[in-house]
Image (cartoon, coloured by chain):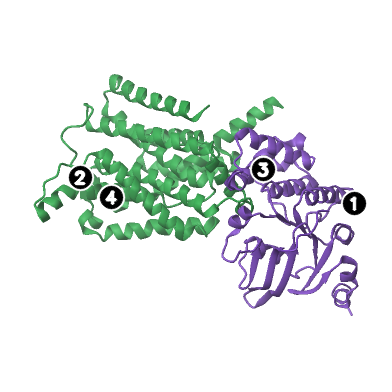
Amino acid sequence: MPEADATPLLEVQGLGKRFGGFVALDGIDLTIAKGERLGLIGPNGSGKSTLVNCLCGTLQNETGTVHFAGRPLNGLIAHERTHLGLARSFQLPKPFHSMSLIDNLRIPLLYTVNKRPGHHLSDTAIAERCAELLKDVGLADKARRRPRDLTQVEMRKLELARAVATGPVLLFADEAMAGLSHSEIEEILAVLMRLNEEGITIVLIEHIMSAVMSFSTRLVVLVAGHKIADGPPQEAIRNPEVERAYLGE
Amino acid sequence: MRAPLFWLIIVAVGLAFIVLTRSFLTNEYFYFAGYVVLQYIVLSTAWNILGGYTGYTNFGTGAFFASGAYCSVVLHKLPTLLHSAFGLTIAPIPLPVMILAGGLISGLMGLGTGYLTLRLRGVFFAIATLALSIVVQTLIVNWDYVGGSRGIYIIRPALAPLGGGYIQYLFSLMTLLAVVAVGIARSIERSRLGLGLHSIRDDELAAEASGVPTLRLKLVATALSGALMGMAGAPLPYYVTYLDPTSSFNLAYAVNSVAMPVIGGMTNWIGPVIGAILLGTIQQVATVTISSALNLLIVGLLLIFFVIIAPNGIVGMVQSWRRQREA
């Protein structure tokens, strides 16, 4: 694992989001260091995906501030945050269904990587990078196929590959393993581990506890829009509040 | 095929078409009917840039088309206005300039409405564009200078440039416009912009997350689509010689420019062209042989047929037939 940097990569202070009268997130403080593998857990409806949506610009938070590598993110829309190096996969895979897998990956390369100064890729370099990304997630032989030809696990791999194609510094994997079998989970975990070794900071949002526990170096627990625990995984799950949230009184 | 080669070919085809028709066809009716078909090639190709590539259904073709036409009316009357108001004498404005001006006005209108409505999706966007058509029509109806609700007569110049009759001149211009529209559509399709527009059509949130500036791309598509529609409308006053709001904002323009790409196929440039030639020709033939009221009935029936039997249009049908043969 790469050494964690002292200056935080992502700094969230007092983040709040409501939908009408419903408070989805309330006063979330969170710091993520470079190179970390952070597990984000919480019961259904606790605000995990809303938090990812607010951090990635799909939704705009009403209160609080978010700094990414020292730069304020407030007011930036989703694609601007992607350009800065924040990437996310969606909980329900959202492939570009009319395009081949190669073209699915060409979009982030053309619109994000090529936008970064000094990173411009030629057409051949883009084709090579697409092939490489597909190979990394084990989809090399399906490069010309359409997403509809993929299985559920392949679809999630494509979703992950597309997020990785943006060349992220920080990657949010939103329930990348839901509904997958044990061996399929192992496959996805291996991919995430390798990405982390390559220097990408990863936030894993997941319900599958075994996966979260084996992957994470730190665990954050959200319940009803509040952060109730933050620390080493084994300590965090023994926190009485966390036990109450998951197991009841 | 490379883009410059494609442009070269379609420009050559367009010019050859103009020369051949002028050399061999003298019947004015051919030009009169052919103009409408060519106009629909421009309209359906323009519609498809936003509707087919980007996935936003525009029912406001009439607004963009008629704005181009009324822009020409204003420019047509401009020399007289300048003379009576300021004593200035200027030459009549040539039609190609009017076409560019009409494109500019409708393009700006596309940009403006796009900015206001592109946050709406699906049926709500379609309703907003339909409303736009009604708003613009109301403005024109109440604008006396361009004829208001009673309409306006436009007298064609006595001499047509390029020789031949004026209808042949209009026909030639519309041929060139069709070439330009098809060339632009095809260039977009193969470009980075085209890939970005497709990603918006497939999934807008995923496109944003991949770094695609969706709003900006959609604005480019609306502006371009609107501009081409306005350009198609600019020669209309000289074609009909009597322009009124009811006919220039006719819903038939909107319905046809949706139906033609749907029937031809929306995924690439050739679809709207096939749809426009097929449907436009059938309509013209039906008008003379059966009745002019039958036009929209034919469109309606064909649309129902295609939506049920071949939702991807003729191009989609051919593609799946080819895939089956390969498999």
Q: Nearer the viewer, mark 3 or mark 1?
A: 3
Q: Nearer the viewer, mark 3 or mark 2?
A: 3
Which secondary structure, mark 2?
Answer: loop
Query: Residue tagged by mark 4?
Result: B70
Q: Nearer the viewer, mark 4 or mark 3?
A: 3
The circle drawn on residue A162 is none
Q: CA distance from mark 1 to mark 4?
A: 67 Å
The circle drawn on residue A182 is 1
Using the image, name the chain to which the residue with label 3 belongs.
A
Q: Which chain is purple?
A: A
Q: Nearer the viewer, mark 2 or mark 1?
A: 1
Q: Is residue B256 above or below residue A210?
A: above
Query: Residue tagged by mark 3?
Result: A105
Of the numbered discs 2 and 4, the one sitting upstream in the chain is: 4
Q: CA distance from mark 2 to mark 4?
A: 11 Å
Most extreme residue toward the bottom, as rendered?
A249
| Residue B66 showing in the rendered view | no
Using the image, name the chain to which the residue with label 2 belongs.
B
Query: Residue tagged by mark 2?
Result: B154
Q: How many marks?
A: 4
The answer to whether residue A193 is left or right of residue B2 is: right
Which secondary structure, mark 3?
Answer: helix
Q: Which chain is green?
A: B
Compare residues B186 and A188 and report the one nearer the observer.
Answer: A188
- The type of residue carrying mark 3 is Leu
- Same chain for marks 2 and 4? yes
Give the percent coordinates (x, y) of residue B264. Answer: 51, 36
The answer to whether residue A186 is left or right of residue B67 is: right
Using the image, name the chain to which the residue with label 4 belongs.
B
The answer to whether residue A234 is left or right of residue B89 is: right
- The type of residue carrying mark 4 is Tyr
Using the image, name the chain to which the residue with label 1 belongs.
A
